[in-house]
Image: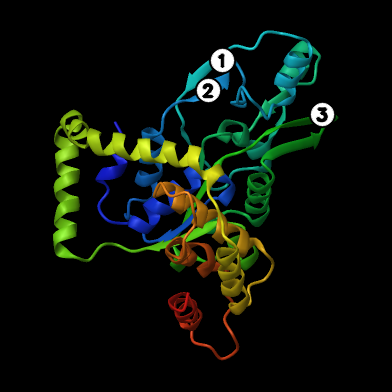
Amino acid sequence: MIFPFTAIVNQEDMKLGLILNVIDPSIGGLLIMGEKGTAKSTAVRALADLLPEIEVIKGCKFNCAPEGPYCIECLEKIKNGESIEIEKKKMEVVELPLGVTEDRVVGTLDIEYAITKGKRHFEPGLLAKANRNFLYIDEVNLLEDHIVDLLLDSAAMGINRVEREGISFFHPARFILVGTMNPEEGELRPQFLDRFGLCVEIKAITDKNLRKEILKRKIEFDTNPEKFMQKWEPEQKKLVKRILEAKKLISEIEVSEEIYEKVVELTSELSLDGHRGDIVLLKSAKAHAAFNLRKKVEKEDIKRVAYFALKHRLKRLPFEEPESEVKRLYDILSRI
């Protein structure tokens, strides 16, 4: 039994960052920077457990959605006029271990099948399992660079294409990417940082009352998990209803000319490289408006998500103190 998402004490930025990515997975995932023991993995698993089942094509190893996009195998079935059955599956958290090989991530040729059957056969990797699920990477800063690059490319394109050993194969790879890292154990290169849609920094809670509440809830859950789940069920149902409504609403969210101008004004003044910051900021603001069941993006939406969307993309100017760029961000936001 998994600890309920709504029972996690505080850590509001982390929870909101996860929720925004569920509402709009095209935001590009979440990087959580913080110490161990701050409920990072608990929050991801709890949110996956909270969300309703998804519809998939029965028997598909890649969790293809009935409406597409499809893997090669499902495309062939559809072209051949075969009937497609639908089943429901619970969303899961696919964990990527440190030291994982490229073949294990993207998939490879099944040698045993080739020897016994005399045919080439593609063996799915972790990206296949992660499609339409959460892909969780603990200590992403300790992964080899080429693996991180491969994952971020797949997340951005939404597809995993494999060309090797005479086999050409592709399948959808649309997952909610969540990476965690402790900055004290090593940094993530700036080009990789930029590829994560949002980034939040969390710390252990120092407030005595909140720490006491964490302790109480954890002991209560461990003592009688069923009773604890029942206690939090109304809050859980309320949150999932709100998320599902937001997912339906997001395509209707209006963005005024003023909001476009504010976004560009903010990112220009911060001298950000490229346009990913602008796009992520606006998408996150739209998701935040939808989560609050509004049909129009407001300045407050930009202010709430700007730190998540832009902080890890800031450039420190020559001779500038480490926290100066963050102060600059807050100064600009205060003028919006």
Going by the image, does 152 lie left or right of 223?
Answer: right
- The x, y position of residue 45, in whole percent, is 39, 39
Quarter of the figure with residue 164: top right
Q: Element under label 1?
A: strand
Q: Element under label 3?
A: strand
- Amino acid at dot 3: Ile
Residue on which disc 1 sits: 86
Looking at the rendered structure, which numbered label has been put on residue 55?
2
Q: Nearer the viewer, residue 126 or 144?
A: 126
- Amino acid at dot 2: Glu
- Of marks 3 and 1, which one's residue comes earlier in the chain? 1
At 62% from the left and 52% from the top, the residue drawn is 148
The answer to whether residue 28 is seen in the rendering is: no
Residue at the outermost bottom position: 319
At 68% from the left and 30% from the top, the residue drawn is 69
> Disc 3 and disc 2: Cα gap in Å?
29 Å
- Amino acid at dot 1: Ile
Mark 2 Cα-neighbour bin, 10 Å: few <14, some 14–19, many ≥20: some
Going by the image, does 245 lie left or right of 193?
Answer: left
- The x, y position of residue 89, in whole percent, is 48, 23
- Of marks 3 and 2, which one's residue comes earlier in the chain? 2
Residue on which disc 3 sits: 167
- Of marks 1 and 2, which one's residue comes earlier in the chain? 2
The answer to whether residue 84 is seen in the rendering is: yes
> Disc 1 and disc 2: Cα gap in Å?
7 Å
